[in-house]
Image (cartoon, grey):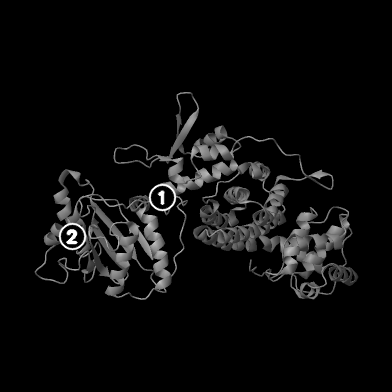
Amino acid sequence: MITNIGKAGADTHGVLRYLYGRGRANEHTDPHLVTSWDGFAPDPGRDEAATLAQLATVLDLRVKQAGDRAPDKHVWHCSVRAAPEDRILTDDEWATIARRILNATGIAPAGDPDACRWVAVRHADDHIHIVATKVRGDLTPPRNWNDYPRADKECAAIEKEYELRQVVRGDHTAAKRPTRAEKEKALRAGHTATPRERLRTTVRTTVAAATGTEEFFAILRSAGVLVDIQYFPSGDIRGYKVALPGDTNAKGEPVWFSGSALGPDLSYPKISERLAPTEPAPMRRHSGRPLTAWQQVTDGVDRIPDVLEQADDVVGQAYITVLAETLDALPLIAPASHRPQLAQAAAAFERASRSRIRAHHQQAQATRRAIKAIVREPPPKDGALLAILLDALLLAVVAAQHWHHTHHHDQQAEAARQAAEHLRAAYEAAAIQPLTVIHQRGLRLTVTVQQQQAALVRRALPDLAEQILTEPGWPALAATLADAETAGRDPVAALTEAATQRELGTATSVSEVLVWRLRHLSNLPLQPAPGQPAPTPPPAQSARPTQQRRTR
Protein backbone atom coordinates (compact mmCIF):
# COMPACT_ATOMS: atom_id res chain seq x y z
CA MET A 1 0.00 0.00 0.00
CA ILE A 2 1.45 3.31 -1.12
CA THR A 3 0.61 6.84 -0.02
CA ASN A 4 1.31 9.92 -2.08
CA ILE A 5 0.97 13.29 -0.37
CA GLY A 6 1.01 16.15 -2.85
CA LYS A 7 2.09 19.72 -2.34
CA ALA A 8 -0.39 21.80 -0.42
CA GLY A 9 -2.83 23.69 -2.62
CA ALA A 10 -5.21 26.60 -2.39
CA ASP A 11 -8.17 25.43 -4.50
CA THR A 12 -10.43 23.00 -2.63
CA HIS A 13 -13.09 23.07 -5.32
CA GLY A 14 -10.50 22.34 -8.03
CA VAL A 15 -9.23 19.22 -6.28
CA LEU A 16 -12.79 17.96 -5.77
CA ARG A 17 -13.64 18.66 -9.41
CA TYR A 18 -10.78 16.36 -10.47
CA LEU A 19 -11.72 13.62 -7.98
CA TYR A 20 -15.36 13.59 -9.05
CA GLY A 21 -14.55 14.07 -12.72
CA ARG A 22 -13.99 11.48 -15.43
CA GLY A 23 -10.20 11.49 -15.14
CA ARG A 24 -7.54 12.18 -17.75
CA ALA A 25 -8.43 8.98 -19.61
CA ASN A 26 -11.99 8.42 -18.39
CA GLU A 27 -10.58 6.09 -15.73
CA HIS A 28 -12.71 7.40 -12.85
CA THR A 29 -15.76 5.21 -12.22
CA ASP A 30 -18.49 5.77 -9.65
CA PRO A 31 -16.76 8.56 -7.65
CA HIS A 32 -18.26 8.79 -4.17
CA LEU A 33 -17.45 9.46 -0.52
CA VAL A 34 -16.52 6.51 1.65
CA THR A 35 -16.38 8.63 4.81
CA SER A 36 -15.85 12.16 6.07
CA TRP A 37 -14.93 14.02 9.25
CA ASP A 38 -18.47 13.79 10.66
CA GLY A 39 -20.13 11.24 8.37
CA PHE A 40 -22.62 13.81 7.07
CA ALA A 41 -20.70 15.66 4.35
CA PRO A 42 -22.61 16.13 1.08
CA ASP A 43 -21.65 13.54 -1.56
CA PRO A 44 -22.06 14.80 -5.16
CA GLY A 45 -21.38 11.29 -6.39
CA ARG A 46 -24.32 9.53 -4.75
CA ASP A 47 -26.66 12.40 -3.80
CA GLU A 48 -28.25 14.14 -6.78
CA ALA A 49 -29.07 17.15 -4.61
CA ALA A 50 -25.45 17.64 -3.49
CA THR A 51 -22.98 19.71 -5.50
CA LEU A 52 -19.20 20.12 -5.58
CA ALA A 53 -19.65 23.73 -4.50
CA GLN A 54 -21.53 22.63 -1.37
CA LEU A 55 -18.85 20.09 -0.48
CA ALA A 56 -16.08 22.63 -1.03
CA THR A 57 -17.91 25.18 1.09
CA VAL A 58 -18.31 22.93 4.14
CA LEU A 59 -14.67 21.82 3.86
CA ASP A 60 -13.50 25.43 3.67
CA LEU A 61 -15.67 26.69 6.55
CA ARG A 62 -12.86 26.99 9.09
CA VAL A 63 -10.53 28.44 6.47
CA LYS A 64 -13.04 31.26 5.98
CA GLN A 65 -13.43 31.67 9.73
CA ALA A 66 -9.66 31.91 10.25
CA GLY A 67 -9.37 34.65 7.64
CA ASP A 68 -5.81 36.01 7.47
CA ARG A 69 -4.64 33.40 9.97
CA ALA A 70 -5.41 30.58 7.53
CA PRO A 71 -2.46 29.29 5.49
CA ASP A 72 -2.32 30.36 1.86
CA LYS A 73 -1.90 26.70 0.84
CA HIS A 74 -4.63 25.15 2.95
CA VAL A 75 -5.55 22.01 0.95
CA TRP A 76 -3.96 18.72 2.07
CA HIS A 77 -4.33 15.96 -0.53
CA CYS A 78 -3.24 12.34 -0.05
CA SER A 79 -3.88 9.29 -2.21
CA VAL A 80 -3.70 5.77 -0.76
CA ARG A 81 -3.29 2.95 -3.27
CA ALA A 82 -3.35 -0.83 -2.84
CA ALA A 83 -1.05 -3.14 -4.81
CA PRO A 84 -2.45 -4.55 -8.10
CA GLU A 85 -2.52 -8.10 -6.70
CA ASP A 86 -4.37 -7.11 -3.51
CA ARG A 87 -8.01 -8.03 -3.05
CA ILE A 88 -10.60 -5.31 -3.65
CA LEU A 89 -11.26 -3.57 -0.36
CA THR A 90 -14.78 -2.55 0.67
CA ASP A 91 -15.84 1.04 1.25
CA ASP A 92 -15.95 0.38 4.98
CA GLU A 93 -12.37 -0.93 4.90
CA TRP A 94 -11.20 2.11 2.95
CA ALA A 95 -13.03 4.36 5.44
CA THR A 96 -11.12 2.77 8.33
CA ILE A 97 -7.84 3.09 6.44
CA ALA A 98 -8.51 6.77 5.75
CA ARG A 99 -9.12 7.48 9.45
CA ARG A 100 -5.92 5.64 10.40
CA ILE A 101 -3.87 7.66 7.88
CA LEU A 102 -5.38 10.94 9.11
CA ASN A 103 -4.69 9.99 12.73
CA ALA A 104 -1.10 8.97 11.96
CA THR A 105 -0.30 12.16 10.04
CA GLY A 106 -1.78 14.51 12.65
CA ILE A 107 -4.38 15.95 10.28
CA ALA A 108 -7.25 14.42 12.25
CA PRO A 109 -6.12 12.71 15.47
CA ALA A 110 -8.61 10.12 16.68
CA GLY A 111 -11.05 11.51 19.26
CA ASP A 112 -10.01 15.15 18.66
CA PRO A 113 -13.21 17.28 18.33
CA ASP A 114 -11.17 20.14 16.82
CA ALA A 115 -9.50 18.02 14.11
CA CYS A 116 -9.38 19.32 10.54
CA ARG A 117 -12.30 18.73 8.22
CA TRP A 118 -11.73 16.06 5.60
CA VAL A 119 -13.33 13.67 3.12
CA ALA A 120 -12.22 10.39 1.54
CA VAL A 121 -13.26 9.93 -2.10
CA ARG A 122 -13.14 6.63 -4.01
CA HIS A 123 -13.33 6.61 -7.79
CA ALA A 124 -11.54 3.30 -8.51
CA ASP A 125 -11.30 -0.15 -6.97
CA ASP A 126 -7.68 0.13 -5.88
CA HIS A 127 -7.34 3.55 -4.21
CA ILE A 128 -8.88 6.48 -2.40
CA HIS A 129 -8.09 10.19 -2.17
CA ILE A 130 -8.19 12.06 1.13
CA VAL A 131 -8.75 15.81 1.00
CA ALA A 132 -8.51 17.96 4.14
CA THR A 133 -8.40 21.66 4.86
CA LYS A 134 -5.55 22.60 7.20
CA VAL A 135 -7.39 24.66 9.79
CA ARG A 136 -8.53 23.06 13.04
CA GLY A 137 -11.69 23.86 15.00
CA ASP A 138 -9.70 26.20 17.24
CA LEU A 139 -8.55 27.95 14.02
CA THR A 140 -4.94 26.80 14.41
CA PRO A 141 -2.95 24.73 11.90
CA PRO A 142 -2.61 20.97 12.46
CA ARG A 143 0.62 19.35 13.65
CA ASN A 144 1.32 17.34 10.52
CA TRP A 145 5.10 17.59 10.22
CA ASN A 146 6.73 14.49 8.72
CA ASP A 147 3.32 13.40 7.50
CA TYR A 148 4.68 11.21 4.70
CA PRO A 149 6.89 8.92 6.83
CA ARG A 150 4.11 8.67 9.41
CA ALA A 151 1.60 7.69 6.73
CA ASP A 152 4.06 5.22 5.22
CA LYS A 153 4.64 3.58 8.61
CA GLU A 154 0.90 3.27 9.17
CA CYS A 155 0.49 1.70 5.70
CA ALA A 156 3.05 -0.95 6.65
CA ALA A 157 0.95 -1.84 9.69
CA ILE A 158 -2.25 -1.86 7.62
CA GLU A 159 -0.69 -4.26 5.09
CA LYS A 160 0.05 -6.80 7.81
CA GLU A 161 -3.33 -6.51 9.51
CA TYR A 162 -5.33 -6.70 6.26
CA GLU A 163 -3.02 -9.39 4.78
CA LEU A 164 -2.12 -7.21 1.79
CA ARG A 165 1.12 -7.17 -0.15
CA GLN A 166 3.90 -5.79 2.03
CA VAL A 167 5.53 -3.12 -0.10
CA VAL A 168 9.31 -2.70 -0.10
CA ARG A 169 10.01 0.57 1.71
CA GLY A 170 13.00 2.87 1.58
CA ASP A 171 14.90 5.16 3.91
CA HIS A 172 14.70 8.37 1.85
CA THR A 173 18.19 7.88 0.37
CA ALA A 174 16.95 7.07 -3.14
CA ALA A 175 17.79 9.38 -6.02
CA LYS A 176 14.98 11.69 -7.08
CA ARG A 177 12.81 10.14 -9.74
CA PRO A 178 12.18 11.96 -13.03
CA THR A 179 8.96 13.91 -13.11
CA ARG A 180 6.16 13.07 -15.50
CA ALA A 181 7.00 16.16 -17.54
CA GLU A 182 10.65 15.04 -17.81
CA LYS A 183 9.58 11.60 -19.05
CA GLU A 184 7.21 13.01 -21.64
CA LYS A 185 9.85 15.47 -22.85
CA ALA A 186 12.39 12.66 -23.23
CA LEU A 187 9.93 10.55 -25.24
CA ARG A 188 9.22 13.46 -27.56
CA ALA A 189 12.97 13.77 -28.13
CA GLY A 190 13.25 10.05 -28.92
CA HIS A 191 15.05 9.03 -25.72
CA THR A 192 14.07 6.21 -23.38
CA ALA A 193 15.90 7.86 -20.45
CA THR A 194 15.38 11.40 -19.21
CA PRO A 195 18.23 13.95 -19.06
CA ARG A 196 18.29 13.53 -15.27
CA GLU A 197 18.83 9.77 -15.61
CA ARG A 198 21.39 10.10 -18.41
CA LEU A 199 23.35 12.68 -16.45
CA ARG A 200 23.22 10.56 -13.29
CA THR A 201 24.77 7.62 -15.16
CA THR A 202 27.44 9.83 -16.73
CA VAL A 203 28.39 11.47 -13.43
CA ARG A 204 28.53 8.14 -11.59
CA THR A 205 30.75 6.62 -14.27
CA THR A 206 32.98 9.69 -14.20
CA VAL A 207 33.39 9.44 -10.42
CA ALA A 208 34.47 5.82 -10.84
CA ALA A 209 37.07 6.77 -13.47
CA ALA A 210 38.42 10.12 -12.20
CA THR A 211 41.46 10.35 -9.93
CA GLY A 212 40.63 13.81 -8.58
CA THR A 213 38.06 16.58 -8.75
CA GLU A 214 39.87 18.46 -11.55
CA GLU A 215 39.90 15.35 -13.70
CA PHE A 216 36.28 14.71 -12.75
CA PHE A 217 35.19 17.98 -14.33
CA ALA A 218 37.55 17.51 -17.29
CA ILE A 219 36.08 14.07 -18.09
CA LEU A 220 32.54 15.41 -17.87
CA ARG A 221 33.35 18.18 -20.36
CA SER A 222 35.13 15.76 -22.69
CA ALA A 223 31.97 13.62 -22.65
CA GLY A 224 30.03 16.61 -23.99
CA VAL A 225 28.33 17.53 -20.72
CA LEU A 226 27.84 21.21 -19.90
CA VAL A 227 29.43 21.97 -16.51
CA ASP A 228 28.91 25.04 -14.32
CA ILE A 229 31.12 25.20 -11.22
CA GLN A 230 30.13 27.46 -8.30
CA TYR A 231 32.78 28.94 -6.00
CA PHE A 232 32.90 30.41 -2.50
CA PRO A 233 34.36 33.93 -2.15
CA SER A 234 37.56 32.23 -0.99
CA GLY A 235 37.89 30.56 -4.39
CA ASP A 236 37.10 27.06 -3.11
CA ILE A 237 34.54 25.04 -5.02
CA ARG A 238 31.09 25.19 -3.49
CA GLY A 239 29.23 22.94 -5.91
CA TYR A 240 28.50 22.20 -9.54
CA LYS A 241 25.67 21.89 -12.04
CA VAL A 242 25.48 19.83 -15.22
CA ALA A 243 23.26 19.91 -18.30
CA LEU A 244 22.96 18.11 -21.60
CA PRO A 245 23.51 20.08 -24.81
CA GLY A 246 20.17 20.67 -26.49
CA ASP A 247 18.12 20.09 -23.33
CA THR A 248 16.61 23.54 -22.84
CA ASN A 249 13.66 25.14 -21.10
CA ALA A 250 10.97 27.35 -22.61
CA LYS A 251 13.42 30.28 -22.69
CA GLY A 252 16.00 28.28 -24.61
CA GLU A 253 18.31 28.03 -21.58
CA PRO A 254 20.04 24.80 -20.53
CA VAL A 255 18.19 22.71 -17.95
CA TRP A 256 20.71 22.44 -15.13
CA PHE A 257 20.85 19.75 -12.46
CA SER A 258 22.94 20.08 -9.34
CA GLY A 259 24.87 17.01 -8.26
CA SER A 260 22.58 16.47 -5.29
CA ALA A 261 19.55 16.63 -7.61
CA LEU A 262 20.99 13.67 -9.52
CA GLY A 263 21.70 11.60 -6.41
CA PRO A 264 22.33 12.14 -2.69
CA ASP A 265 25.88 10.83 -3.11
CA LEU A 266 26.69 13.01 -6.14
CA SER A 267 26.93 16.39 -4.43
CA TYR A 268 30.34 18.02 -4.66
CA PRO A 269 31.23 17.44 -0.97
CA LYS A 270 30.37 13.73 -1.29
CA ILE A 271 32.33 13.35 -4.53
CA SER A 272 35.37 15.24 -3.27
CA GLU A 273 35.42 13.02 -0.18
CA ARG A 274 35.60 9.91 -2.35
CA LEU A 275 38.21 11.45 -4.66
CA ALA A 276 40.41 12.82 -1.86
CA PRO A 277 44.08 11.82 -2.36
CA THR A 278 45.44 9.21 0.00
CA GLU A 279 48.81 7.62 0.62
CA PRO A 280 49.29 4.84 -1.94
CA ALA A 281 49.38 1.38 -0.44
CA PRO A 282 52.46 -0.82 -1.01
CA MET A 283 52.33 -2.65 -4.33
CA ARG A 284 50.87 -6.09 -3.74
CA ARG A 285 52.76 -9.00 -5.30
CA HIS A 286 52.17 -12.59 -6.22
CA SER A 287 55.12 -14.98 -6.52
CA GLY A 288 57.41 -11.98 -6.53
CA ARG A 289 55.55 -10.22 -9.34
CA PRO A 290 53.38 -7.10 -8.83
CA LEU A 291 49.67 -7.69 -9.32
CA THR A 292 48.00 -6.10 -12.32
CA ALA A 293 45.17 -3.64 -11.78
CA TRP A 294 42.65 -6.32 -12.78
CA GLN A 295 44.07 -8.68 -10.16
CA GLN A 296 44.03 -5.94 -7.53
CA VAL A 297 40.39 -5.11 -8.25
CA THR A 298 39.45 -8.80 -8.11
CA ASP A 299 41.35 -9.14 -4.83
CA GLY A 300 39.48 -6.14 -3.43
CA VAL A 301 36.10 -7.45 -4.58
CA ASP A 302 36.97 -10.90 -3.17
CA ARG A 303 37.39 -9.34 0.29
CA ILE A 304 34.02 -7.57 0.29
CA PRO A 305 31.90 -10.51 1.58
CA ASP A 306 34.27 -10.98 4.53
CA VAL A 307 34.33 -7.22 5.23
CA LEU A 308 30.53 -7.04 5.22
CA GLU A 309 30.34 -9.99 7.60
CA GLN A 310 33.02 -8.86 10.03
CA ALA A 311 33.59 -5.08 9.86
CA ASP A 312 31.53 -2.33 11.44
CA ASP A 313 28.76 -0.63 9.50
CA VAL A 314 30.66 2.47 8.33
CA VAL A 315 33.39 0.31 6.81
CA GLY A 316 30.81 -2.01 5.27
CA GLN A 317 29.03 0.93 3.65
CA ALA A 318 32.37 2.17 2.25
CA TYR A 319 33.00 -1.17 0.55
CA ILE A 320 29.48 -1.24 -0.86
CA THR A 321 30.18 2.20 -2.36
CA VAL A 322 33.38 0.86 -3.93
CA LEU A 323 31.47 -2.16 -5.21
CA ALA A 324 29.07 0.24 -6.94
CA GLU A 325 32.01 2.13 -8.47
CA THR A 326 33.40 -1.14 -9.84
CA LEU A 327 30.07 -1.88 -11.50
CA ASP A 328 29.90 1.69 -12.85
CA ALA A 329 33.38 1.35 -14.41
CA LEU A 330 32.91 -2.06 -16.05
CA PRO A 331 30.84 -0.88 -19.05
CA LEU A 332 33.78 1.37 -19.99
CA ILE A 333 36.22 -1.53 -20.34
CA ALA A 334 34.22 -4.70 -21.03
CA PRO A 335 33.73 -6.04 -24.57
CA ALA A 336 30.82 -4.36 -26.34
CA SER A 337 28.71 -7.53 -26.31
CA HIS A 338 28.65 -7.57 -22.49
CA ARG A 339 28.06 -3.85 -21.89
CA PRO A 340 24.23 -3.78 -21.94
CA GLN A 341 23.90 -6.34 -19.11
CA LEU A 342 26.72 -4.72 -17.14
CA ALA A 343 25.13 -1.28 -17.54
CA GLN A 344 21.83 -2.70 -16.28
CA ALA A 345 23.60 -4.27 -13.30
CA ALA A 346 25.25 -0.93 -12.46
CA ALA A 347 21.95 0.94 -12.83
CA ALA A 348 20.16 -1.53 -10.57
CA PHE A 349 22.88 -1.48 -7.91
CA GLU A 350 22.86 2.34 -7.83
CA ARG A 351 19.97 2.17 -5.36
CA ALA A 352 21.89 -0.38 -3.26
CA SER A 353 24.97 1.86 -3.03
CA ARG A 354 23.48 4.24 -0.44
CA SER A 355 21.93 4.00 2.99
CA ARG A 356 21.67 6.23 6.03
CA ILE A 357 24.95 4.77 7.28
CA ARG A 358 27.76 7.22 6.59
CA ALA A 359 30.64 5.50 4.83
CA HIS A 360 34.25 5.67 6.00
CA HIS A 361 35.68 5.91 2.47
CA GLN A 362 39.35 5.83 3.45
CA GLN A 363 38.99 2.15 4.34
CA ALA A 364 38.40 1.18 0.71
CA GLN A 365 40.78 3.49 -1.15
CA ALA A 366 43.16 0.74 -2.33
CA THR A 367 40.37 -0.95 -4.29
CA ARG A 368 39.16 2.45 -5.55
CA ARG A 369 42.64 3.22 -6.94
CA ALA A 370 42.73 -0.16 -8.69
CA ILE A 371 39.34 0.54 -10.31
CA LYS A 372 40.68 3.77 -11.76
CA ALA A 373 43.78 1.94 -12.98
CA ILE A 374 41.88 -0.69 -14.98
CA VAL A 375 40.00 2.07 -16.80
CA ARG A 376 43.39 3.29 -18.08
CA GLU A 377 44.75 -0.14 -19.04
CA PRO A 378 44.13 -1.78 -22.43
CA PRO A 379 41.28 -4.30 -22.24
CA PRO A 380 42.69 -7.74 -21.41
CA LYS A 381 42.94 -10.26 -24.22
CA ASP A 382 42.56 -13.05 -21.67
CA GLY A 383 38.78 -13.52 -21.40
CA ALA A 384 39.25 -15.41 -18.16
CA LEU A 385 40.14 -12.17 -16.33
CA LEU A 386 36.69 -10.71 -16.97
CA ALA A 387 34.98 -13.97 -16.03
CA ILE A 388 36.98 -14.18 -12.79
CA LEU A 389 36.09 -10.58 -11.88
CA LEU A 390 32.41 -11.09 -12.70
CA ASP A 391 32.38 -14.26 -10.59
CA ALA A 392 33.81 -12.30 -7.65
CA LEU A 393 31.41 -9.39 -8.25
CA LEU A 394 28.42 -11.72 -8.23
CA LEU A 395 29.42 -13.08 -4.83
CA ALA A 396 30.02 -9.55 -3.51
CA VAL A 397 26.64 -8.27 -4.74
CA VAL A 398 24.85 -11.23 -3.12
CA ALA A 399 26.76 -10.46 0.10
CA ALA A 400 25.64 -6.82 -0.18
CA GLN A 401 22.06 -7.99 -0.61
CA HIS A 402 22.35 -10.02 2.61
CA TRP A 403 24.00 -7.07 4.43
CA HIS A 404 21.19 -4.71 3.45
CA HIS A 405 18.59 -7.32 4.38
CA THR A 406 20.03 -7.75 7.87
CA HIS A 407 20.02 -3.95 8.28
CA HIS A 408 16.36 -3.80 7.13
CA HIS A 409 17.27 -1.76 4.04
CA ASP A 410 14.43 -3.20 1.97
CA GLN A 411 14.82 -1.15 -1.21
CA GLN A 412 18.60 -1.59 -1.25
CA ALA A 413 18.32 -5.35 -0.75
CA GLU A 414 15.86 -5.61 -3.64
CA ALA A 415 18.12 -3.46 -5.85
CA ALA A 416 21.09 -5.74 -5.08
CA ARG A 417 18.99 -8.77 -5.98
CA GLN A 418 18.13 -7.25 -9.35
CA ALA A 419 21.78 -6.33 -9.95
CA ALA A 420 22.80 -9.92 -9.20
CA GLU A 421 20.42 -11.19 -11.88
CA HIS A 422 22.00 -8.94 -14.52
CA LEU A 423 25.50 -9.85 -13.32
CA ARG A 424 24.70 -13.54 -13.47
CA ALA A 425 23.61 -13.19 -17.10
CA ALA A 426 26.75 -11.17 -17.92
CA TYR A 427 28.96 -13.73 -16.18
CA GLU A 428 27.43 -16.67 -18.03
CA ALA A 429 27.96 -14.94 -21.37
CA ALA A 430 31.53 -13.92 -20.52
CA ALA A 431 32.50 -17.34 -19.14
CA ILE A 432 31.51 -19.41 -22.19
CA GLN A 433 34.63 -18.76 -24.29
CA PRO A 434 37.35 -19.09 -21.61
CA LEU A 435 35.62 -22.08 -20.00
CA THR A 436 35.44 -23.79 -23.39
CA VAL A 437 39.18 -23.23 -23.95
CA ILE A 438 40.07 -24.62 -20.53
CA HIS A 439 37.55 -27.47 -20.88
CA GLN A 440 39.03 -28.57 -24.20
CA ARG A 441 42.50 -28.58 -22.71
CA GLY A 442 41.18 -30.73 -19.86
CA LEU A 443 39.77 -33.23 -22.34
CA ARG A 444 43.23 -33.60 -23.87
CA LEU A 445 44.84 -34.62 -20.59
CA THR A 446 46.03 -38.20 -20.50
CA VAL A 447 44.01 -40.69 -18.51
CA THR A 448 46.90 -40.94 -16.06
CA VAL A 449 46.96 -37.17 -15.49
CA GLN A 450 43.17 -37.08 -15.07
CA GLN A 451 43.39 -39.84 -12.46
CA GLN A 452 46.13 -37.93 -10.65
CA GLN A 453 44.00 -34.76 -10.54
CA ALA A 454 41.01 -36.75 -9.30
CA ALA A 455 43.14 -38.17 -6.50
CA LEU A 456 44.18 -34.64 -5.54
CA VAL A 457 40.52 -33.56 -5.32
CA ARG A 458 39.69 -36.54 -3.12
CA ARG A 459 42.55 -35.64 -0.79
CA ALA A 460 41.75 -31.94 -0.58
CA LEU A 461 37.92 -32.04 -0.65
CA PRO A 462 36.75 -35.51 0.37
CA ASP A 463 33.17 -34.39 1.06
CA LEU A 464 32.74 -32.73 -2.36
CA ALA A 465 34.99 -34.89 -4.50
CA GLU A 466 32.39 -37.25 -5.98
CA GLN A 467 30.08 -34.36 -6.87
CA ILE A 468 32.93 -32.45 -8.53
CA LEU A 469 34.17 -35.45 -10.52
CA THR A 470 30.72 -36.01 -12.07
CA GLU A 471 30.09 -32.37 -13.01
CA PRO A 472 30.42 -31.22 -16.64
CA GLY A 473 32.98 -28.68 -15.45
CA TRP A 474 35.40 -31.30 -14.10
CA PRO A 475 37.71 -31.37 -17.21
CA ALA A 476 38.24 -27.58 -16.87
CA LEU A 477 39.11 -28.00 -13.19
CA ALA A 478 41.51 -30.86 -14.01
CA ALA A 479 43.28 -28.64 -16.56
CA THR A 480 43.43 -25.80 -14.02
CA LEU A 481 44.97 -28.08 -11.38
CA ALA A 482 47.58 -29.17 -13.92
CA ASP A 483 48.33 -25.50 -14.72
CA ALA A 484 48.67 -24.68 -11.01
CA GLU A 485 51.09 -27.56 -10.51
CA THR A 486 53.14 -26.46 -13.53
CA ALA A 487 53.23 -22.93 -12.08
CA GLY A 488 54.80 -24.31 -8.89
CA ARG A 489 51.71 -24.35 -6.69
CA ASP A 490 50.87 -27.23 -4.37
CA PRO A 491 47.53 -28.29 -5.92
CA VAL A 492 46.16 -29.74 -2.67
CA ALA A 493 46.97 -26.56 -0.76
CA ALA A 494 45.57 -24.44 -3.60
CA LEU A 495 42.33 -26.42 -3.69
CA THR A 496 41.95 -26.19 0.06
CA GLU A 497 42.50 -22.43 0.00
CA ALA A 498 40.04 -21.98 -2.87
CA ALA A 499 37.40 -24.07 -1.11
CA THR A 500 37.70 -22.27 2.22
CA GLN A 501 37.83 -18.79 0.69
CA ARG A 502 34.04 -18.81 0.32
CA GLU A 503 31.28 -21.36 0.96
CA LEU A 504 30.37 -23.69 -1.92
CA GLY A 505 27.01 -24.97 -0.75
CA THR A 506 24.96 -22.61 -2.95
CA ALA A 507 27.00 -23.15 -6.13
CA THR A 508 25.29 -25.16 -8.86
CA SER A 509 28.68 -26.02 -10.38
CA VAL A 510 31.34 -26.37 -7.68
CA SER A 511 34.00 -27.26 -10.25
CA GLU A 512 33.33 -24.06 -12.20
CA VAL A 513 33.62 -21.91 -9.09
CA LEU A 514 36.91 -23.61 -8.17
CA VAL A 515 38.29 -23.05 -11.68
CA TRP A 516 38.01 -19.28 -11.29
CA ARG A 517 39.23 -19.20 -7.71
CA LEU A 518 42.28 -21.32 -8.53
CA ARG A 519 43.13 -19.30 -11.60
CA HIS A 520 42.87 -16.06 -9.64
CA LEU A 521 44.73 -17.29 -6.54
CA SER A 522 47.51 -18.84 -8.63
CA ASN A 523 47.60 -16.04 -11.24
CA LEU A 524 47.13 -18.55 -14.08
CA PRO A 525 46.77 -17.35 -17.68
CA LEU A 526 44.07 -18.77 -19.92
CA GLN A 527 46.65 -20.52 -22.11
CA PRO A 528 49.61 -22.50 -20.72
CA ALA A 529 52.99 -20.81 -20.59
CA PRO A 530 55.37 -21.43 -23.53
CA GLY A 531 57.33 -24.64 -23.04
CA GLN A 532 54.65 -26.39 -21.02
CA PRO A 533 54.43 -30.05 -22.15
CA ALA A 534 51.53 -30.70 -24.49
CA PRO A 535 48.95 -33.03 -22.98
CA THR A 536 48.20 -36.33 -24.63
CA PRO A 537 44.72 -36.43 -26.18
CA PRO A 538 42.34 -38.93 -24.56
CA PRO A 539 39.60 -40.82 -26.40
CA ALA A 540 37.03 -38.57 -28.07
CA GLN A 541 34.68 -36.80 -25.62
CA SER A 542 32.36 -33.85 -25.59
CA ALA A 543 34.29 -30.72 -26.49
CA ARG A 544 32.18 -28.14 -24.71
CA PRO A 545 31.04 -27.82 -21.10
CA THR A 546 27.39 -27.52 -20.30
CA GLN A 547 26.74 -23.94 -19.23
CA GLN A 548 24.98 -23.90 -15.87
CA ARG A 549 23.35 -21.18 -13.89
CA ARG A 550 24.54 -20.48 -10.36
CA THR A 551 22.02 -19.97 -7.64
CA ARG A 552 23.94 -17.42 -5.63
Whole-percent x and y of residue 134? 24, 53
The reply to whether residue 365 is in sight is: yes
In contact (CB < 8 Å): disc 1 and disc 2: no
Task: Find the distance from the CA under tag 1 to the CA under tag 2.
Answer: 31 Å
Q: Is residue 546 left or right of residue 414?
A: right
Sequence-first disc among 1 and 2: 2
Side of 382 where 340 appears, left or right: left
Disc 2 marks a residue whose amino acid type is Arg
Front-lying residue, 438 or 296: 296
Question: On the rendered image, what quadrant is the N terminus found in?
Answer: bottom left
Q: Which residue is mark 1?
A: 194
Between 284 and 77, the one lying in front of the other is 77
Q: Is residue 346 left or right of residue 85?
A: right
The spot of residue 238 in percent (x, y) is 47, 32
Q: Residue at x 87, y 64 (%)?
A: 535
Q: Position of residue 10 (x, y in %)?
A: 21, 50
Q: Amino acid at mark 1?
A: Thr
Among all residues in the image, which is located at the extreme left?
49
- Residue occupying image coordinates x 12% and y 59%: 53
Q: Which residue is mark 2?
A: 17
**In front of the other: label 1 or label 2?**
2
Residue 534 horizontal side relative to residue 504, left or right = right
Residue 374 is at least partly visible in this image: no
Q: Quadrant of residue 156?
A: bottom left
Q: Residue at x 73, y 68 (%)?
A: 510
Task: Say how many tags the image has.
Answer: 2
- Measured as percent of width and height from the top left, residue 142 is found at 27, 52
